[in-house]
Image (cartoon, rainbow, N blue to C red):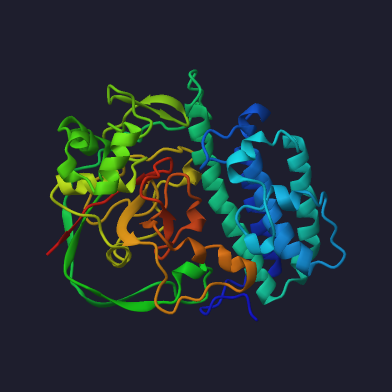
Amino acid sequence: MSLQPESGALKPARDALLDHYERVRRQSVAFCEPLAAEDMVVQSMPDVSPTKWHLAHVSWFFERFVLTPHLSGYQPLDERYDFLFNSYYYTAGQMHSRTRRGLLSRPTVDAVLDYRRHVDAAMHRLIPAADADLRFLIVLGLNHEQQHQELMHTDLKHVLAQNPLKPAYRTDAATPSGETAGSLAWQGFPGGVEEIGASGDAFCFDNELPRHRVWLDDFELATRPVTNRDFRSFVEDGGYQRPELWLSDGWATILAEGWDRPFYWEEDLESHYTLGGPRPVDGEAPACHLSYFEADAYARWAGARLPSEAEWELASRSAGDATSGHFVDSGMLQPRAGNAGDGLRQMFGDVWEWTASPYAPYPGFTPLAGSLGEYNGKFMCSQLVLRGGSCATPADHIRATYRNFFYPSNRWQFTGLRLARSL
């Protein structure tokens, strides 16, 4: 059975694939250059994984799903790593508890880097002989690694923020752009029958397929994301004390967790923790680290709503180049204000934008065959879809059809919102 989704997969030339492989793998290691080994072993909450674990897991992915079944004579560096660095692929075997990854003092960071080099050497032997199906599998592994590169940033931010010293990952990060967001305006879109989902031969994940028709009523979308200045007004207006604004589960969550402001903001609402260390809150930049509950409450307070993912995808077609936003490539690692102007702005990059759509299969969805079918499909329950990428997303990883997903209470990711209204 072919591994490829029904729309096909990217089939780069073998040399281009090897270059792609080397570039992505270098980016993961380059992320660690400002870190000490002590930074890379901490697990600050169950949703966070140590940097060391991320580096090992993405190598495990290539070893388990690419090298072991496809490279004759391949020998794992250490067979015990198959248990330690499996994440959630139960059809591939048992795994070490997710909540106890921070207890793995061994293998050391140096040993994990040796593991990466072992896997890379084998992949260099395999890639020149890869056929179309195997090339798709390798590209899937590289996109998987880019997802973990984003998690490495967000997880490390959570780790460092627990330290009373509030250390910076990089002191040159998170500097304001100096731009102004401009006033919030609206752009209308006519309803009707539209198509959403991936098409063509470019790489996509299985959850972006199949392309299918949806019905949309007339709607309008805010021309920019909600900014820190906007959200501060919500906080100062007692937004976190007004139960009428909140979904029932959201109200229960803020009472249980004591939320009264966005994650990483200080009580004075003037400063927050960033990967550049403590910084003044830039009122012009998109608000981030908001849960779905906070995004939804803000939208109610503003007399609007969150868009559906179909509305977001349709609108994004008028937003220009998907790689034009502030991505991890900029090195800023914090959402930044964009240029004020006409039309939709900052649809891509800066912050993942919550939608009102549950993460569910598209009509006719078929997961990948075998263990890789666990990659997306089994999480299609109790989560919400986000669109557009963030300041921690690689620019060449995102596209208009990309479906991210998190639980509604999650807020350690770079998540924000854009308002919508029905016409």
Location of residue 258 by image quarter: top left
Provide residue 334's location: percent of width, then percent of height: 41, 38
Location of residue 183 by image quarter: top left
Residue 172 shown left or right of residue 308 in the figure: right
- State how many labels appear: 0
- Residue 42, placed above or below residue 9: above
What residue is shown at x 72% (from left), y 64% (from top)?
Answer: 66
Residue 197 shown left or right of residue 86 in the figure: left
Q: Quadrant of the C terminus?
A: bottom left
Q: Is residue 33 visible?
A: no
Provide residue 250's location: percent of width, then percent of height: 28, 45
Q: Nearer the viewer, residue 305 or 8?
A: 305
Q: Quadrant of the N terminus?
A: bottom right
Q: Nearer the viewer, residue 419 or 285?
A: 419
What residue is shown at x 47% (from left), y 68% (from top)?
Answer: 207
What residue is shown at x 38% (from left), y 55% (from top)?
Answer: 388
Q: Nearer the viewer, residue 331 or 34?
A: 34
Provide residue 180's location: percent of width, then percent of height: 25, 38
- Residue 340, placed above or below residue 315: above
Q: Is residue 395 visible?
A: yes
- Residue 333, placed above or below residue 121: above
Residue 365 shown left or right of residue 306 in the figure: right
- Residue 405, placed above or below residue 313: above
Provide residue 348's location: percent of width, then percent of height: 37, 54
What residue is shown at x 23% (from left), y 56% (from top)?
Answer: 343
